[in-house]
Image (spheres, rainbow, N blue to C red):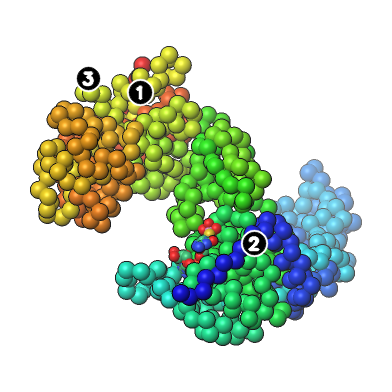
Amino acid sequence: MKKRNLYLNVIPVEEALDSYLSVVKKRVPLKTEIIPVVQALGRVTVSAVYAKYNSPLYNSAAMDGVAVVSQKTKDACELKPLVLQKEDFLVVDTGDPVHEPFDAVIMAEDLIETDDGGLQITEPAMSWQHIRPVGEDIVAHELILTSNHKIRPMDVGVLLSGGITEIEVYKQVNVAIFATGTEIIEPDQNIADGVIIESNSRMFEGLVAEQGAKPFRLGILQDDYALIRDNVREACEKFDVVIVNAGSSAGTEDFTVHVLRELGEVFVHGVAIKPGKPVILAMVGDKPVVGLPGYPVSAYVCYQNFVRPLLNHLQNFAEENRETVRAFLSKRLVSSLKHKEYVRVKVGKVDDKIIATPLARGAGAAMSLVRADGFCIIEQNQEGLDAGDSVTVELCRSLKEIENTVVSIGSHDLMLDILADMLPNKYKNMYLSSSHVGSLAGLMALKRGEAHMAPIHLLDEESGIYNIPMIKKLFTGGCRQMALIKGVKRVQGFIVPKGNPENISAMSDVARCRYINRQSGAGTRVLFDYLLRKNGISCEQVNGYDKEAATHMAVAALVQSGAVDCGMGIESAARAMNLDFVPVGFEEYDFAIERNNLDLPHVKAFIDVLKSEDFKQKVMRLGGYEFSACGEIVSVS
Ligand SMILES: Nc1nc2c(c(=O)[nH]1)N[C@H]1C(S)=C(S)[C@@H](COP(=O)(O)OP(=O)(O)OC[C@H]3O[C@@H](n4cnc5c(N)ncnc54)[C@H](O)[C@@H]3O)O[C@H]1N2
Ligand code: MOO
């Protein structure tokens, strides 16, 4: 058996970074260079910069008009206008030099031309009126920029006006990026079982460039010790920093740490951070080399915690201040004392309360990075957080956007994605964020004040009425006035493989196949349980009753994979996965909402999109929907 790399004397995040940066500071002198000012945007000055020239360079007209000698105009007034003869003035445009004896400019609008070529004025010109004296803006030898200043667009402008064309700045850092792994392929290569599409290095390229450094993606290296070693060695000769992705852990082909030990020194392997534990911080000669873990979220979190401060230091950038917000946690989060954890969260503002809802926590859940509004950090000394705890969230989306977002928690339907896409297109700066937890859990979230609305499809068995009875039951006591925004009628049925090989056509057929259920509280589960009772079938008779999937699409994906023969869900999910569908009946999918919230501008915009013809057309294409009352408000009291 090949040797595993059982590493990991994990150390706290701050300690790891501090000790690494102190080595880097000792061994890597900051590099500087002199470059044209016109290329210096975003770079940091090495020393103070002083103006060479005055600006303006000479006394100049601030307005279009004529230059005059102010003394000669002192008697002009409304009752006794003065006519200036040709020799008394000089026509000037804004920016023209004004020389002695002239000492004032009269604006063109205040002049009346006389027949003999003179100019009549009705008030005297003050000495220096409408003249910009030499050096009014910048005086030669004046300080323009201090040292350690990050150059902004207006700084470039003023430097040039002050006669500075070249400037000494800290060097832009060149960062080499390697992906590693024999199973890793480029996105345009053929996919097959066991391959992984390369994506992390592209994310690093973006992060490096966003930080003002220069990324050089050097491709994918196979899991071959000598190959990785030779490539990393060569990169260390040519580049300022090297990132090696993956192969950081304990796998039999995780070579990164061994390579770095051979080429240089490994200072840290294993940090108390989740995700991201196997990160490697090393030096090869005077070049920092960072081994980032393979899982995308681990890679991202480690980049932000270790590579970002490293590149900031090498370019002499100040650490950026992330916008943070205090929020109430909607769910309990258990964490271990072994690490500091970065939990991706959705953030929403409901009833003046900011709520953070945790997203998928897996290190491979790259979509959680895409969906996240921020990160909730659980410190290493905390065992976890309770629902309702006040937490600090580091935002990656502006608070303003978050405040303009409709928060929807409840049952999933593909049309929610269409709404989320259409809303900001139709209404600038308004958004929809939806979490999918099932109908009943959505109503509970609504009740706790964590959402503006809950998409639901809950059948009341006694009355045969959808949604309203359940809202009445849950929101009793009348403390909250509730309403229903009518959504769609959609077909529920059995999602089966193409050609319906098990020949499923009725509830009785379900009992003889491998079934995938939905979680309890999901509207589809309620419907399925109702149909079981109606048909006299017990749960025990259903093979797979205890196996649950969280959304219609998850059910369809399991059917498609061949793991199950059948699951209940909506037609659009079956169609999206190119599966067959056996309809069972229509159900009503609506949005429960507190009546007060109907007046919020973003909720109004949401309803408007729901009513639009364009929306209906798009949903129609998914298949299995009817829109008779879409967007109508029904009062529930
Ligand atoms: N026995 C142990 N196994 C693992 C441990 C451990 O402590 N003991 N740590 C786990 C943790 S935590 C992490 S994080 C991962 C780190 O894995 P590696 O850095 O060694 O990376 P690989 O095994 O090569 O890849 C893992 C995974 O990452 C994805 N990946 C890799 N490269 C790319 C890329 N260029 N683009 C996109 N995605 C990439 C891919 O899903 C790989 O399967 O190790 C655990 N194991
Ligand atoms: O620490 Mo690893 O990064 O959880 O997946």
Q: Residue at x 60, y 55 (%)?
A: 273
Instruction: Tell me which corner region of the image, top left, top right, bottom left or bottom right, holds residue 520.
Output: top left
Amino acid found under the numbered disc labelled 2: Asn
> How many circles with numbers are drawn on the protein?
3
Q: Judge whether 450 appears above or below 108 on screen.
A: above
Question: Residue 471 — which label?
Answer: 1
Q: Nearer the viewer, residue 301 or 634?
A: 301
Q: Disc 1 on helix, strand or loop?
A: helix
Q: CA distance from mark 1 to mark 3?
A: 14 Å
Mark 2 or mark 3: which comes first in sequence? Answer: 2
Q: Is residue 533 visible?
A: yes
For label 2, being within 8 Å of ligand 1 is answered no
- x, y (%) of residue 228? 53, 81
Q: Is residue 514 left or right of residue 330?
A: left
Amino acid found under the numbered disc labelled 1: Ile
Q: Quickly name the residue at label 3.
A: 463
Q: CA distance from mark 2 to mark 3?
A: 62 Å
Q: Quickly name the residue at label 2.
A: 9
Q: Disc 3 on helix, strand or loop?
A: loop
Q: Is residue 420 left or right of residue 398?
A: left
Q: Nearer the viewer, residue 167 or 318?
A: 318
| Viewer-side label of 2, 1 | 2
Q: Residue at x 43, y 25 (%)?
A: 594
Image quadrant occupied by the C terminus: top left
